[in-house]
Image (tube, helix red, strand yellow):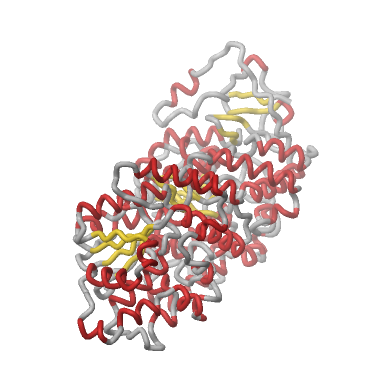
Amino acid sequence: ERLHTTDRGYWSKASWGLLGGSGSGPSEESFHSHSDRPMAPAGEEGREEEANPGGNPTFPTEEHRSKVICQHGGFWVLPFWLPGTLAAQRRLVTRPDDIFIATCPKSGTTWLKALVFSVAHRHLHRPSDPRHPLRNTSPHDCVPFLEEVFATDPDPNLEALPSPRIWSVHTPYSALPAAVRDSGCRIVYVTRDPKDVCVSLFYMAKTVEYYAAKIPLTMDKFFGLFCQGIHLYGPIWEHALEYWNESLRRPGEVLFLAYEEMKKDPLRSLRKLAEFLGRPFSAEEEREGLVEEISELCSFRSLTGLAVNKEGLLERFTSIPLPRNSFFRRGEVGDWRNHLSPEMAARLDKITEEKLRGTGNHRMGLTQHDGFWIPNFWLQGMLVARSRYAARPDDIFVASTHKSGTTWLKALVISITQRRSHSPRDPRHPLRTANPHDCIPFLEEIFTADEDPDVDGLPSPRIWSVHTPYSALPESARSSGCRIVYIIRDPKDVFVSYFRFAHAVAKASKVAPVNMDEAFELFCTGVYPFGPIWEHALEYWNESLRRPDKVLFLQYEMMKGEPLGAVNRLAAFLGCPFSVEEEKEGLVEEISELCSFQSLSSLEVNKEGDLETLKSVSVPRRSFFRVGQVGDWKNHLSPAMAERLDMITEEKLRGTGLKLS
C-alpha cells in the first residue's frame, strides 16, 4: 500500500475514509511527495504550497500498516497532525515563560506531563487534593499536544490562556516554530532506551489498530520498520540527537532527561525538573513532604489506578480514537527482555551505537565536548558550573583525570588542611567515618544535582574535586588565584584501573560492560571519561609551568616512591607547611599512614554500599580501592598493548617536557 500526500499530508488509499476523507480518496494526479524536503520554516508558508507542484512524483513505498505515517523533513510524522505542525510554525506566538514537553512517542510522555503540570501548578493544586486535575482528567488533557491544537483549529485563540502555558510536542527540534527556539522559553525533553520504546510503541500500535484500521500487525514486521527508523516521529536516534545537541548549546533553556535515570531516582529528577523550570522546592515544601507527594501522585501505580485513566477514549484526540488505558502499559525499565529476542536486542543496540557514534559513546555513556569525552550524566553539571561558579582566592581544587590517584589525593588534602581540627589518630577523623569522595565532593556532581547550589555559605577553605579539563574549568577558578593540585599516572595503569572500575560500576548497575579489547581501542583513541588522558594532563602541565605557585603538578609514581616528601610538598603548596614541632611529633608519618591504600581500604566505611554523594551513577565504595600499585598493568596488558600505549604517549608528549611512562 502506497502512502500519498495531499494538502493535508500523506494518506494511504485504504485509510482515506478512516482519516476523514470522503469517497475513495483524491485522485492520484493530485498527489505530491514531501518526503525529501524539510518542513517550511515559520514565515514561509507560501512556499509550502508552491513546492513540488504536479509532475511525476516519487511515492514513498514503505508500509506502516497499523498507523499511517508520512515522511516529512526526514522524520515519519502523523499525517493528520502535519497541517497542525505547519500551522504552528507560522502562527504560534510564544511567551518567555511557556513550557514545552518534547518527546519521541512512548518515551515517558505521560509521566513527564504529569510531573511538569504538578510542579508548575502546585501553588494552586496540592497533590493530596481530591479535586487535583490529575485525579479527574488525563495528563494529556491537562497538557495538550501543540500539533493537535493547531490541527483542530489552524488559528486557535491562545493569548487568553494564563501563564505558564504548558504544551507537549512530538515534533523534532528542527521543525519547532522559530518562536519556540528563539523566545527563551523552556523545553524539557525525555528519551528512553530504544528497545523499550520499540516494545511500548508496538503495543500502542496494536491498541490503535483494534480501534481503527483492524489490520494485523506482528512484532517482527514492526521491529523491522523500527530499525529503519520508520515509526512515529522516528528515527528515534535523530529525534533525540536534535534535542541533545540543543541542550548542550543552551543548557539553561533545554533540559535533556533519560527515562531510566528518572525511574532510578524519581525524587532527585523531580527536584532537578523544578529547578530547571524556575520553581525550586522551598525548604518548607521539602519539610512538608511535597516532593514525595508529587512523585507519588504522578507514579505509574497512582495514575493507572485512577478511574479517569481506565475507561473510554481520550477526548482531547479528535484525529484518531485512543483508549485512555493505552497510555499505561508497564512503565518498567528493561521490559523489552520479555518481548525481544537476544538477536533483536543486539541488532537494535548495534544500530543505536552506530547512530550515536561521534556524538557520544552509547555503551560508555560519553559525549565529546570541546575535544574531551565527558560522561553524559555530568556534562550539564560541568557546563552549569563553568558559567555560574564563583571561586574564592582560598578555594582548593583537587584535579585529576579518571583513575589517576584521585581518592588518595583527596585523603591527603583533607588530612593536611584539617589537621588542626582532626588528628590522624582521632577515631572520629572524617576519613575514618566517611569515604574521601564524601569529604571532598566533585564540583561536577554538585552542579548536576542542583544547578544553583548554595555554596557561598560554606566556610573557607572550600575544597572541590574535578575531573574537568583545565580549559573547561569555571573562569573564576582560573583567574581568582585559588590553588589547583593535579595528579596524573602512567596511562597503562590508568587504563587497567579504569577498566576494572568500569566493570564494577557496570555490574552494580546491571548493564553489560565493554570488553577489554574494545575498551583498549577506545582508550588509545582518547575515548574514556574526560579523555584523551594526554591532552588532559598537558593542559594542567602547561598551566603549572606558567603559574607554579597556583598549580601543583604531581605524578602518582613519584608520590608512591616518596610519600613523606609528597605530603610535605603538598602542605607547603597549600600554604600550611608542617612546623618543626609537627615534624618531631611524627605528624607527617601519621597522615601518610592514615591515607595509605592499606589503611583506607581496610576501613568499614570504604567496603560496603554505594557512594552517597554520587547520585548520577551507582558506584560501589570498594571500587575505589583495587590494588594501588605502580606497574600493575604488567598483570593485565600484553607486551604489544603496552608498547602501543607507550608509543602513543611518547608521540603525544614529544617536545612538552612531560614524561608519563
Image position of 178 (left or right of 53): left
Residue that appears at 70% across and 24% down:
2
Reply above or below: 233 against 456: above
Q: Residue at x 48, y 18 (%)?
A: 50
Is 56 above or below relative to 547? above
| Residue displayed at 46% across by 28% down | 40
Question: Could you tell me residue 56's position as x and y percent?
Answer: 61, 12
The quadrant holding residue 62 is top right
Residue 252 visible to the viewer: no
Is the residue 375 above or below the residue 43 in the image? below
Compared with residue 425, is residue 337 higher up or lower down, i.e. above or below?
above
175 or 147, which lies in front?
175
Say which residue appears at 41% left-offset and 45% top-offset.
649
Across and down, in percent, residue 502 comes to 54, 58
Considering every residue shown, the one lying at the far right of the view is 216
Please state which of residues 310 and 520 is positioned toward the viewer in this rendering: 520
Q: In which quarter of the image is residue 36?
A: top right
Q: Which x, y percent locates residue 199?
A: 69, 48
Quadrant location, the N terminus: top right
x and y percentages locating residue 506 in the rendered image:
59, 59
Q: Is residue 499 left or right of residue 322?
A: left
